[in-house]
Amino acid sequence: MQADYIIVRFGELTTKGKNRKNFSARLLRNTKEILSGFTRLTYRLTFDHIYIMLNGENPDDVCEALKKVFGIHSFSVCYKIEPDLDQIKQAAAEIINNYEKEAFTFKINTKRNDKNFPMMSMEINRAVAGYVFHHTDKQLKVDVHDPDLMVRIELRKDAAYVMDNVILGAGGYPVGIGGKALLMLSGGIDSPVAGYLVMKRGIDIECIHYASPPYTSDLAREKVLDLLNVLKDYNHGGIRIHIVPFTKLQLSVYQNTDESYAMTVMRRMMYRIAEGVAKKRNIKAIVNGESIGQVASQTLDSMNTINQVITTPVIRPVACLDKLEIIRIAEKIGTYGISIRPYEDCCTIFTPKNPATKPKDYKAEAYEAKWDYAAEVQECIDNIETIVVNANYKNDEDLF
Amino acid sequence: MIYLDYVATTPLSDDIYQTYTQLLKKYFANADSAYRLGYEVNRLMETSRAKIASMLHVKEDELIFTSCASEANNLAIKGVAFQYQNRGRHIITTAIEHSSVANTCRELAEVFGFEVDYLSVDNQGHIDLEELKSLIRPDTILVTTMYVNNEIGVINPIKDIAKIIKTVNPKTKYHVDMVQALGKLPVDLNDIDLATFSAHKIFGLKGSGLLYKKHSTTLVPLINGGQQEFDLRGGTSNACTNIVLAKTIRLALESQKAHYDYVKKLNDFMREEIKKREALVINSPEDASPFILNISAPHYKPEVLVHDLESSGIYISTKSACSSKATEASHTLAAMHLDEEVAISALRLSFSHLTTMDELKTFLKALDESLTRVRKQR
């Protein structure tokens, strides 16, 4: 039995009113970009569905990629077969037998477009359900109101279509519909999860990473790009990252501040640079992986002292999650294994022994007055290196 | 040249040759070096591992690159024996294993004092599942069997074997030598703890083997050294070889179905032809892998026939290349309790998708001529 197309149902955007069209158009665009590797696919957008014609592409691979598209509530693989009752019965039985649960309720729902077909819809429902009951090991029960599994049959003159309704999508809004934010990406566990969560709400991201070579290695930088290589499958196949040459400024910070305040002042510098880059790129918000209380820079006092140097809103999607909850998401989205690679990033080199957990803004300002940090901040912004991680990243498929 | 010994080894595929030579120059660095040059090599090697894992439906840290299948068999069997010797010291294998399994088991028995039981086979090469059931004991730590026998092509029912092991003693590990199955028969690692694969049997490189080891199984390494292969096999990674293994396996799996169907036709044809000849008997059972056809020419010395055919540019073998220097009957045929005359006069033919019908016809003609020209010596 050959899968013919995939029918995609929209997520939360069905709650939208007049700008619904923008949402569905964006969803179609994102879907196409994420599935761009499958060159034979063709698409059709209707009011409440997207149809993806497989044209011979492997349905399992396409489904796997589709699960990462935000804005999709669920989707189904549809089988195109001859409009023949025996074949329909077999297709329905196959769908029932492939369903993950052992005991469940189901319903057969037939739409008979071809009125010349010798049986009425209800008769077909009963015939198919009867067949299925006798050709499965599963414990089945019919529930016509709220079935676990709905098998739909559509009868046309030239073909019959049989489909189920069970593959859940990623949910959320289509990425990009909510504008763009700048994600501060260190390479740790939290920031990629923050990026994932903000994308789920329809916000596209660019990233900023602070590199301090030779104190941080090439491998730390590579790790960050590898993380984006995972995250890119959730936006629309490509993420831009700005890598900041941070060594000089970071050394100045350590030279001019007391050890206990170095981290606070450094974070203030990072925020200033992030805001500078955001303004340059016309980005409206900054996102980071700060989680309340996790480390010294993430107490409310620290956040207050650090955050006040900029006016751009800072979104902290994982602020209220436990570390274990964050790890669980990281594992699910596939960033965890990369995040735990043991390379130092600029936050972990020169770690002070006793960082201030309740830093005062006036003290931080006093340290900052000791040198012309603004010039060095500007120098960082002017010298950023921008990379786009997309399908071409580490593409050595010809070797494999 | 007519090559009919694809079970001994295969010629290198052009695709693999090109990829490999391209890699050799560029990626010379040590995969464990901490700079970009080394890291890049490591990355490609790990990508290869991940790709193979997804093709075999296992996890990437369940695959260990080795230098050959014999090493993988040694690592699996001795690794399990040494690791679990406090649980028990009893091992079960079959009487028709490849020498790398048979001799490893023998060493464990003779040098390390393990107890090894050998499953007998009938005259078709089939094992008896009831016998297996009766041999498994509470102290049985390992059962090791091949999937497809390398001499007669008999296929072991590994699903059933796994099921029996798990019912009688769930702690017993099951290792399967899958060298002659990969790329030819469906490979399902679900119920198996360890499995061995080789590249050079599927048009890949020599010096390239692979061991699958389920997470739940622990091994004692044979080669202690650095951190390579999850601490299970020290020694600088043979990176480029390991990198091209992914492509080697992919190519084999992609065309598995088509190649199987094609070779099945060749095999059917050969069986019909051999049956027509009174001087020859077929030793491979009907349900054997079609890639291997073992026949005997009673009263002839098989080596003489091999050399006579060789002079017309035809290459076949008498038995497994790995034990071709021993002069007695192959242990597989001996275990099948065939007529002695049949057992000592065996010839092994093996085919691949590169074999053509014309080659087989030419071979048959040459064989007929040899059989009339060469003197019977017994």
Image (cartoon, rainbow, N blue to C red):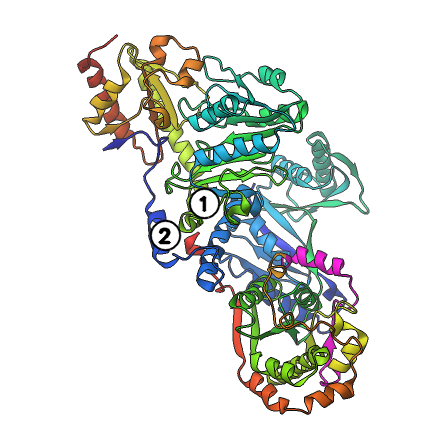
Judged left or right of residue A225, residue B289 is left
Characterize the local packing of mark 2: few (<14), some (14-19) or many (20 or more) Cα atoms within 10 angstroms: some
Q: Taking B376 as reference, is B273 above or below it?
A: below
Q: Position of residue A177 (x, y in %)?
A: 67, 72
What label sits on residue A107 in the rendered view?
none
**Which of the image's four quarters has the N terminus of chain B?**
top left
Q: Which residue is mark 1?
A: B250
- The range drawn in magenta is A307-336
Q: Which residue is mark 2?
A: B19
- Dot 2 falls on a residue whose secondary structure is helix
Judged left or right of residue A113, residue B249 is left
Q: Position of residue A5 (x, y in %)?
A: 58, 52
Judged left or right of residue A62, residue A13 is right
Q: Position of residue B135 (x, y in %)?
A: 60, 17
**Residue under disc 1 on the same chain as residue under disc 2:** yes
The chain letter under disc 2 is: B
| Residue name at image x 62 percent, y 49 percent | A77
Amino acid marked by disc 2: Thr
Q: Taking B181 as reference, is A19 above or below it?
A: below
* Mark toward the start of the polypeptide (1 vs 2): 2
The chain letter under disc 1 is: B
Q: How many marks?
A: 2
